[in-house]
Image (cartoon, rainbow, N blue to C red):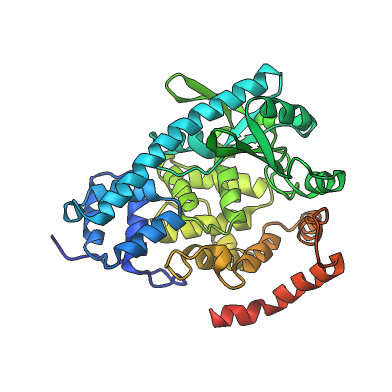
Amino acid sequence: MGAVPVMTAPSGTPVLCPEFAFLLHATRWPHDADAIETIRHAAAAIRDPARLIALARRHHVTGLVARAVGHCEGLADTPLRRELRQDALDLAEEQFRQLLQTRQAVAALRAHDIPVAVLKGAPAALTIYGEVGVRTSIDIDLLIARKDLERAHEVLSRVGYERSEPPCGATARQLGAVSRYGKDWAYDHEHSDTGIELHWRLFQNPRLLGHVGVDDAVDAVVSPGITLPVLPRDLGTLYLTAHGAEHAWSRLKWLADLAAVLRQEPGAADRLVTDAAANGIEHMTMAALLLCHELYATPLPEKDCAALAQEWRTRKLLDIARASLIGEQDGTELEDRAMATTRKNLGHYLFSSDPRYWWRELTYDLFHDAGADHSRSLAGRVIQRIVNVMRLPSARAAS
C-alpha cells in the first residue's frame, strides 16, 4: 500500500482527524475505482474505530461508510466492519419499508382527491444514489395545500397514523400557534418506526421558497413499479440546499447529497446559483457550494461569482456551516454543544435581504411556542433569547 494521502484543509477549514477525513472519502459518491483507491489509503490512517462509528451515526451516513469499509481488505472481519454492515442491512430494510409506506400514504391521500408531493426521504435517496441502503431517512415528508390539512389529517388517522405534534389533545390556541408559525404536523404510525411530517409549506418562514407548492410536483418513477409525485429536479436541488442551510449543514448526509447531485449533472452549480438568486437566497446557496467544493472538490459555477463568494454574508454563513458540520469531530450532536443552535438560528437572518423575511424570522423566534404551556412568562422567554444572543461571542471564544 502506498503512502497515506494527507487531506489538506482549505483556508478556514479545521484540521480533520483521520476518522472524519475517512468519512468524507466514504461519502463521496459514486465509489468508482479512483474513489475506492482513495478510501483504501484513508482507511490506513484510522486510529479510533469507535469514533468513526459515532461520527457515521451522528451524520446519518452509516450506509455509505459501510459501503466504503467493505472496499478495504485491511478492515475485513473487524468489529468495525461487522457493526457497520449490520447498520447498513438494517438501513436497507428500513428504506424498503419507508418506500412502501410512502406509496401507501400517497395513495390514501390521492384516493380522497388530496394532491400531495413527497419531499426528500427514500425517493430522493433512490434518485441521487440509485439504490437503497445508502442514505438514511428518518421520516416521510409530504407536502399538501394548507386548505387540505384537516382532510389529510382524517385520512392519515384512518390508515394508522396518530398526530404527535401538535398532540391530539392540543388546544385551539396551540393549533393556532402551529398553523401561524409552523410548517407541518407530525404523525407516528402504530406499526412502524417511521412517521410522517405533513407539510403545508416547506419552511417555517413563508418567505423562504414560500411560492413552492404541491402543484409544482411531477410524477417520477423512483423504483421499478413505484411512481411518486416529487419536486422537479432543479427545484428539488434548491430545496435540498435550503433545507441543509436551515440546519447549518450540521449533518454530512445533506452535503453528501448535494455533492452527488453536483457531480452527476453538468451545469448543476450554475443552475442552482441562478435559481437561488431568483429566489433571493444566493448567499446561503453560494456558502453551500463553497463548503461542498472545500470538502468534496465539487465544481463551482462557471459564471463569475467571485463577488458573491467574498460577500460578508456568504463568508459568515460558510463559517457557521463549517463549525456546525465539523464541530469537535467526536460525534456530539449540535444541540449538545454550547450555543451552537443559537449560532445556527442567528444565521437564518443572513439568508435573505427582504425585511419581510426578517420580520417572519423574528416573530417565529419570539412567539412560535406561544401556544405551549410554560412556567416562564412570554416576556421572560423573550429576555432569555436576547441573553442567549449576548452570550454568543463568549461561547465562541470558549469553543
Q: Is residue 71 above or below residue 130?
A: below
The x and y percentages for residue 185 are 70, 41
Res 115 quadrant in image? top right
Quadrant where the N terminus is found in the figure:
bottom left
Determine if residue 345 is in view.
yes
Marker count (numbered) = 0
Which residue sits at x=78%, y=42%? 169
Is residue 29 among the parts visible in the rendering?
no
Residue most extreme to the left: 1
Residue 261 higher or lower than 154, as above or below: below
Residue situated in front as seen by the camera: 37 or 337:
337
Front position in the image: 347 or 391: 391
Which picture quadrant has residue 212? top right
Q: Position of residue 143 (x, y in %)?
A: 66, 34
Q: Residue at x 50, y 65 (%)?
A: 322
In this view, 363 is above or below 377: above
Residue 236 position within the rendered picture, expressed as x and y whole percent measured from the top left: 57, 39
Out of 364 and 303, give the one closest to the viewer. 364
Residue 357, picture quadrant: bottom right
Question: From the viewer's perspective, is 72 left or right of 250?
Answer: left
Name the residue at 62% across, 48% down: 276
Describe residue 167's horizontal placement relative to residue 2 as left or right. Answer: right
- Tell me where residue 203 appears, x and y as whole percent: 69, 47
